[in-house]
Image (cartoon, helix red, strand yellow):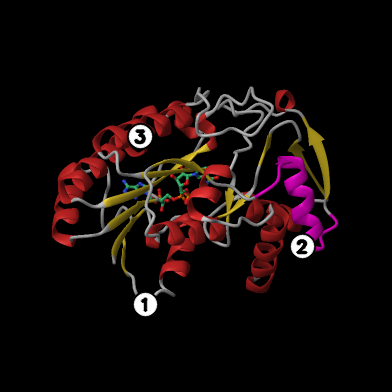
Amino acid sequence: MKVLITGADGQLGCSLRCEFDKDPELETVYTDVSTLDVTDPVAVDRFMTDGRFDLVVNCAAYTAVDQAESDELKAAALNTNAVGHLARAAARTRTRVIHISTDYVFSGQGYRPYTEKDEPYPTSIYGRTKLEGEALLTSFCPDSVIIRTAWLYSEFGSNFVKTMLRQAKEKKDVKVVSDQIGTPTYAGDLAKAIHLIAKSSAWKPGIYHFSNEGAASWYDFAKAIFELAGKSTEVMPVSTAEYPTRAKRPSYSVLSKNKIKKTYSLTIPYWRDSLRDCVKALDTDA
Ligand SMILES: NC(=O)c1ccc[n+]([C@@H]2O[C@H](COP(=O)([O-])OP(=O)(O)OC[C@H]3O[C@@H](n4cnc5c(N)ncnc54)[C@H](OP(=O)(O)O)[C@@H]3O)[C@@H](O)[C@H]2O)c1
């Protein structure tokens, strides 16, 4: 099977590289903006026509959630229009697509895990541009799989875990919001799930939710990072109102994983167990 991964230098892309490179049955081509700018429709069409891929996994995205509030054109170019370019090229070349989306498509006013049937209502430019990308993909290439995930971290790139571990070296205490609830998700676990779906004989198009199991606030997440890394840094809870950000984030965005677990017979690790593995790997790297 020949696979194209876009945005492959990002944290999910790097995690996919670790997972896919172990599989001798896959021939994987990794691209990022310097090798395939997904906002260029002509380049996307040519690359996909020449490459004759069986599957494209789109990890390219504009992920600076706050910056997107003042950079809507760029966020839309990457999160919406580029998904349309990939979708059109995929439909023409009969290439399957796995696309990654976000829990930020939801308003966060709920009190139970969001299912794929729940109505999205994004409260940020990032969330809206990602939702519009989902819609373009579904309309041009209905045979696609869209995976909404949340709170990604990994050994790669910049993310909350690495920021907290850096803060532990510089500060005695940190303030972290305690009234936004979601699920930290290890990109390595998502990469494993994508690998399984890519190779599954039971390809079933549609939207799926994937995060690690369980739920936590950013405060809980920070406490766990310091505990697992053996750091004495104090975590002080603050409210979203005390720590305003440019983009409005959902206060509750736990995702129900029932559909993906049932369809693809997946077992998903609890968030703290995966965090332990990642913190250990980062500690070894340090
Ligand atoms: N991170 C999270 O917490 C989170 C949560 C929920 C969902 N997601 C979704 O999960 C997916 C993967 O996220 P991630 O954390 O791996 O993101 P990431 O680390 O920001 O990776 C995105 C990659 O896309 C690249 N890129 C930017 N412009 C491009 C272009 N024009 N053409 C091709 N590639 C381009 C980026 O390069 P530069 O770094 O040079 O810009 C980067 O390497 C995204 O769809 C994201 O929306 C992420």
Labels 3, 1: front one:
1
Disc 3 residue crowd, few under 14, some 14–19, many 20+, Cα 10 Å: many
Q: Amino acid at mark 2?
A: Ala
CB within 8 Å, label 3 to label 1: no
Q: Which quadrant would residue 16 be assigned to in this image?
A: bottom left
Which disc is residue 24 wearing?
1
Residue 274: x and y in percent read 66, 59
Q: Is residue 74 visible?
A: no
Write the start and end of the magenta stretch as one range.
Answer: 213-232
- Label tally: 3
Membership of 225 in magenta stretch: yes
Residue located farthest toward the bottom when viewing the structure as drawn: 24
Residue named by callout 2 = 229
Looking at this view, is 167 or 215 the one in front?
A: 215
The dominant secondary structure in magenta is helix
Labels 2, 1: front one:
1
Looking at this view, is 40 or 121 the one in front?
A: 121
Which disc is residue 215 wearing?
none
Q: Is residue 77 above or below residue 17?
A: above
Of the numbered discs 2 and 1, the one sitting upstream in the chain is: 1
Residue named by callout 3 = 133
Q: Is residue 207 above or below residue 242?
A: below
Looking at this view, is 102 or 111 the one in front?
A: 111
Q: Quadrant of the N terminus?
A: bottom left
**Which residue shows up at 74% across the image and 55% down it?**
225
Disc 1 residue crowd, few under 14, some 14–19, many 20+, Cα 10 Å: few
In the image: residue 236, left or right of residue 245: right
**Which residue shows up at 50% across the image and 22% down it?**
121
Q: Amino acid at mark 1?
A: Pro
**Which residue shows up at 25% across the image and 42% down it?**
87
Labels 3, 2: front one:
3
